[in-house]
């Protein structure tokens, strides 16, 4: 998407809120708000400064459980 000319913010929106709207799921997912479902990836670098920073995961939260991404990767090797 970056190669197509989208800004980092537009790339993030296409994967989150716009993606949820396209799938008709926007009332439940796509943004962080009370009452919404959310699995999160916490980054240790700003994706708006460089979209490549999306690969800098610090923690993953899935169904309320916090995971270390390195441990997740190691568990599938």
Image (cartoon, helix red, strand yellow):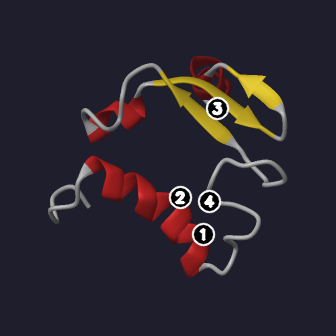
- Say which mark, if any, is on residue 30: 4
- Considering the numbered disc 2 on the image, is that residue within a helix, a strand or a loop? loop
Mark 1–mark 3 distance (CA, rounded to whole Å): 28 Å
Q: Residues within 10 Å of mark 1 (few under 14, many from 20)?
A: some
Which residue occupies 60% across, 69% down?
Answer: 20
Which residue occupies 78% across, 55% down?
Answer: 36
Mark 2–mark 4 distance (CA, rounded to whole Å): 5 Å
- Considering the numbered disc 4 on the image, is that residue within a helix, a strand or a loop? loop
Mark 4–mark 3 distance (CA, rounded to whole Å): 27 Å
The earlier-in-sequence mark between 1 and 4 is: 1
- Considering the numbered disc 1 on the image, is that residue within a helix, a strand or a loop? helix
Mark 3–mark 2 distance (CA, rounded to whole Å): 26 Å
Is residue 37 depicted above or below 72 in this figure?
Answer: below
37 relative position to 24: left or right = right
Eye-nearest disc, 4 or 3: 4
Residue extending farthest to the front is 34
Q: Which residue is mark 2?
A: 16
Give residue 28's position: percent from left, percent from top.
76, 64
Image marks 2 and 1: residues in contact by CB distance under 8 Å: yes
Q: Which residue is mark 1?
A: 20
The earlier-in-sequence mark between 4 and 3 is: 4
Q: For the C terminus, which image quadrant? A: top right
Image marks 1 and 4: residues in contact by CB distance under 8 Å: yes
> Closest to the observer: 1 or 72?
1
């Amino acid at each position: 998407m970056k190669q197509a000319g989208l800004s980092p913010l537009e790339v993030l929106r296409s994967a989150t809120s716009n993606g949820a709207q396209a799938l008709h799921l926007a009332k439940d997912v796509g943004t962080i708000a009370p009452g919404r479902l959310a699995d999160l990836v916490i980054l240790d670098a700003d994706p708006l400064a460089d979209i490549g920073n999306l690969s800098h995961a610090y923690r993953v939260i899935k169904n309320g459980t916090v995971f270390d991404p390195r441990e997740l990767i190691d568990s599938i090797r």
